[in-house]
Image: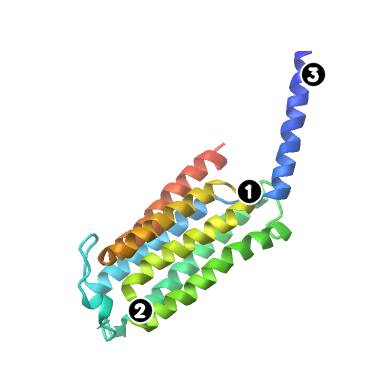
Amino acid sequence: MIQQNKDHLDTLQEIRKMMERSSRFISLSGLSGIGAGLSALVGATLVYLYLETIPFRRMPSYYVINSNYENWGIGYRSFFILIAALVLVFALSSGVYFTTRAAQNQQQKIWDALTKRLLINLAIPLVAGGIFCLGLLFHGLAGLIAPATLIFYGLALINASKYTLNDIRYLGISEIVLGLFGTFFLGYGLDLWAIGFGVVHIIYGVSMYYKYESN
């Protein structure tokens, strides 16, 4: 009788896993979060060096209003776009690599209708946020870019969380809170950006790895 009940429980757990795989993308890897966090911290370090400042030292006022700021022979608009592009490329590369590996280990398809829905819901706020940030940069409002990226990224994660693990939702909320805080303390936007995209991502990645992948 005990063995029969155990078999029933095993069957129910297997059915539950199958239903979860069909309705949610569960192959996200914690290592991709760690990779994204490290990429963000490297990018933030380069920006600190470019602006000749240190973490948690309030940015000078010219950072917000001076559209002619230049260092290392490159204007701040071009530099910020370059750093953002590099961070994005490295973060996406690590995400694709580790997520693909996790999907293969779980024998789950990496590209199907569920993945498309996940990416579409993730992309809509990200694209809107990217265009919004370009507008801020165009008008010389560089101090608002870091908070805006956090807010739109958080919205993208929450929007996509219904197609993947619930942990993503909590990560998104954390990013939005940091972004909103940064809109009131513009001089610390870069610090909050480094915390949100760097430190929080690494903490999230480590947590995800030990929760879902270490066994």
Q: Secondary structure at mark 3?
A: helix
Q: CA distance from mark 3 to mark 1?
A: 30 Å
3 or 1: tag closer to the N-terminus: 3
Crowdedness of circle 3 by 10 Å Cα count: few (<14), some, many (20+)?
few
Mark with earlier residue (2, 1): 1
Rendering coords of residue 211 (x, y %): 53, 39
Quarter containing the N terminus? top right
Residue drawn at (41%, 59%) of the image = 197
Say which residue label 1 marks. 26
Residue at the image point whose x is 53% and y is 46% from the top = 167
Q: Are marks 2 and 1 in contact (CB under 8 Å)?
A: no
Depth check: give the residue in front, 80 or 121. 121
Instruction: Say whether residue 156 is left or right of residue 15.
Output: left
Amino acid identity at mark 1? Ile
Q: Is residue 33 visible?
A: yes
* Residue to which mark 2 is pinned: 79
Element marked by disc 2: helix
Res 194 visible: no
Judge whether 97 appears above or below 146 on screen. Answer: above
Instruction: Tell me which label, 3 or 2, sits earlier in the chain.
Output: 3
Residue 191 placed where, x, y %? 30, 61
Q: Which residue is mark 3?
A: 4
Cα distance in 3D space between marks 2 and 1: 36 Å
Near mark 2 (Cα within 10 A), the count class, few <14, some 14-19 or many ≥20, is some
